[in-house]
Image (cartoon, grey):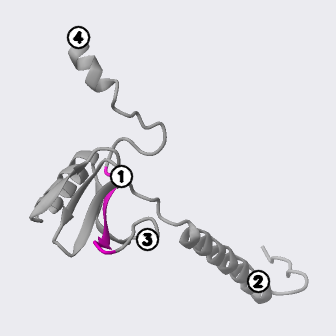
Amino acid sequence: MPKDVDRFLARAPILEEGPSLGRVFAVVCESWLLSEDPRAIAPRAEPVASRRTALEAADLAREAAEAFERHGFHKPSGAWWGSDGVRLHRFAVRPAKPAPAGGLILGSGLAALGAVAALALIKAAWPRGKRPLSRA
């Protein structure tokens, strides 16, 4: 590998965790007033898009930042930014969070409860006592 190419690739971070392929990325817009201290005040976060490939999400973040008069790319954070003179908006591409499992657990519990209730009804409706002998 040529040294002039290697010096660029050596500085590219390799992420060990999180998704790498497919439509598993999201774009989040974090906004602050320019008068606020970002270390003291958490940003107002708003999802811009989800279920995108990494390329689509990066292009969307860049285009969203370019909609502002002042915009650019912040290398250390890996995010695009834009400012309208009153607010600063940071457009970050992040792995999308998986859907919460609470609904799945609740649904499974309700299904099990329904099965137990159905068995109880069948047992209650079943004739009690000995079965009559067949005449055949």
Confirm or deny contact between disc 2 and disc 1 (CB under 8 A): no
Frontmost of labels 3 and 1 is 3
Query: Could you say whether the residue bearing mark 4 is in a helix, strand or loop?
Result: loop
Where is 86 relative to 125, above or below?
A: above
The residue labelled by disc 2 is 120
Marked residue nearer the N-terminal end (3 or 1): 1
The residue that appears at 46% across and 45% down in the rendered structure is 18
Alpha carbon distance from label 3 to label 4: 44 Å
Confirm or deny contact between disc 2 and disc 4 (CB under 8 A): no
The residue that appears at 13% across and 57% down in the rendered structure is 63
Residue 85: where, in percent of width, then height? 17, 72
Alpha carbon distance from label 2 to label 3: 53 Å
The residue labelled by disc 1 is 24
Marked residue nearer the N-terminal end (2 or 1): 1
The crowding category of the residue bearing disc 3, from other C-alpha atoms within 10 Å (few below 14, some 14 to 19, many at least 20), is few
Query: Could you say whether the residue bearing mark 3 is in a helix, strand or loop?
Result: loop
The residue labelled by disc 3 is 42
Report the predominant secondary structure element of the magenta stretch.
Answer: strand
Q: Quadrant of the C terminus?
A: bottom right
Numbered label attached to residue 2: 4
The residue that appears at 86% across and 80% down in the rendered structure is 131
Q: Is residue 78 magenta?
A: no
The crowding category of the residue bearing disc 2, from other C-alpha atoms within 10 Å (few below 14, some 14 to 19, many at least 20), is few
Q: Quadrant of the N terminus?
A: top left
